[in-house]
Image (cartoon, rainbow, N blue to C red):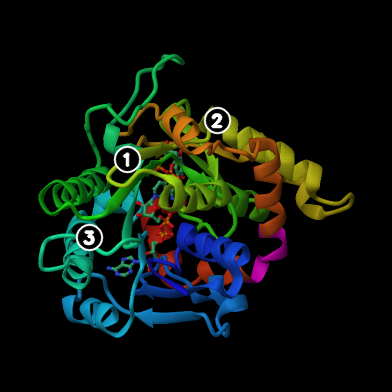
Amino acid sequence: MRTYLVTGGAGFIGSNYIHYMLRKYGDAIRIINVDALTYAGNLENLKDIENLPNYTFVRANICDKEAISRIFAENDIDRVVHFAAESHVDRSIKNPEVFVQTNVLGTAVMLNCARAAWEREDGTYPEGKKFLHVSTDEVYGSLPDDENAFFYETTPYDPHSPYSASKASSDMLVKAYMDTYHFPANITNCSNNYGPYQFPEKLIPLIINNALQGKKLPVYGDGKNVRDWLFVEDHAKAIDMVQEQGKLFETYNIGGHNEKQNIEIIHIILETLQEMLPEGDPRKAYINEDLITYVEDRKGHDRRYAIAPDKIKADIGWYPETMFKDGIKKTIAWFFEHEEWMKNVTSGDYQKYYDDMYGDK
Ligand code: NAD
Ligand code: TYD
């Protein structure tokens, strides 16, 4: 039975990936989920699978060398899928240190422990040992407002935020391990994800949650920054396909071919909420454009991200399957069905952070 070590599996993309993999492979695989449970990690995301015999949760920090090497010593790990990271740009602007700790040093610990467990004396690795480093398109910097400009795997790195700089550094470490030790890895650089279980500090769940409560919808700057949105299950599928069908040592860009200005996203969410709420629902009365509030721009705000997912399509056959109009409906339906989840994550620490960030705007 193949054993996966997934880091950050209690977060947004990690928990979707674990669900996807258990749906796809059932008990033919075993998953060990290692997560420190920061503010972004939520075991509620995995409630439905927590008792499966082929799933184990270990609470550990990826910076803790002893804890991570113990997991490798006690289990014959075949695949590592490394999601664990501090992931929010605004938080990185307020407090960059923890991004360096987790994203750079934590990745170094993961690489060291995997190499120590896997590398033979002659410097080779057993067949089937693979490490996948999950990264972001934000490492490539910002594109101009030109619909023909895209990020490719060959685009030079040019990160601007402390988040993207820390992810770029972690990518460079993975590249160094591949070049120096022939360490069996892949890097994937993905565009913005949306879908179930996303923490409501990111644009899409924040707008859905605020609109449902009749709160203001904060738009940074002129609202015309562009992101390339990908439904999270398509990302989970891409990661699996890269690990199983991709060429080792390669980088693959994963994107939604779905570029939209932030203000367009907000309008789509408002329209879709109106469409999906039942007649007579009192929230229909206040969900409209009057909630939109322009606020101060993010410092160093990247203008446009857009991936051309040509290489992954040509080499592996992956493409973004979910149209945005369908993905956003699925996402909103999920939030309708999980009001309790939203209540839980928006209480306590998250609420404090939210107030600090937006005050009474
Ligand atoms: P998330 O913030 O929702 O989840 C991160 C998870 O990592 C949480 O469960 C958290 O508890 C855990 N974690 C944080 N620090 C840790 C530590 N020191 N040790 C162990 N666990 C720790 O993030 P996400 O949106 O699911 O992103 C997952 C990965 O995908 C990240 O590496 C991110 O850079 C990358 N990525 C995200 C997006 C996106 O749109 N969200 C796009 C491209 C790439
Ligand atoms: P975000 O979801 O934080 O992802 P990222 O910064 O990693 O792309 O933000 C997506 C876009 O939405 C980004 O251009 C910033 C903007 N934004 C707002 O306008 N208002 C908000 O409240 C948030 C969280 C983001």
Q: Is residue 171 left or right of residue 236?
A: left
Judge by depth and name the residue closer to the eye, 314 or 239: 314
Instruction: Provide the secondary structure element on which disc 1 rests.
Output: strand
* Three-letter residue code for mark 1: Thr
* Three-letter residue code for mark 3: Thr
Image location of residue 304, percent across then percent down: 39, 27
* Numbered mark located on residue 251 in the image: 1
Q: Could you tell me if residue 299 is visible in this image?
A: no
Q: Which residue is mark 3?
A: 107
What's the CA distance linking mark 1 and mark 3? 17 Å
Instruction: Provide the secondary structure element on which disc 3 rests.
Output: helix
Give the vertical position of 275 relative to 128 (above or below).
above
Residue at horizontal 23 percent and vertical 36 percent from the top: 160
Q: Is residue 109 magenta?
A: no
Q: Is residue 262 left or right of residue 326?
A: left
Mark 2 vs 1: CB contact within 8 A: no
Q: Label 3 crowding class (10 Å Cα cut-off): few <14, some 14-19, many 20+?
A: many
Q: Which residue is mark 2?
A: 258
Judge by depth and name the residue closer to the eye, 319 or 262: 319
* Three-letter residue code for mark 2: Asn
The residue at label 3 has a CB less than 8 Å from ligand 1: no
Foreground tag (2 vs 1): 1
Residue at horizontal 86 percent and vertical 51 percent from the top: 278
Q: Label 2 crowding class (10 Å Cα cut-off): few <14, some 14-19, many 20+?
A: some
Of all residues, the one furthest to the right in this rendering is 279
What's the CA distance linking mark 2 and mark 1? 21 Å
Could you tell which of marks 3 and 2 lies nearer the N-terminus? 3
The part of the chain drawn in magenta is 335-340
Image location of residue 130, percent across then percent down: 32, 59
Mark 1 vs 3: CB contact within 8 A: no
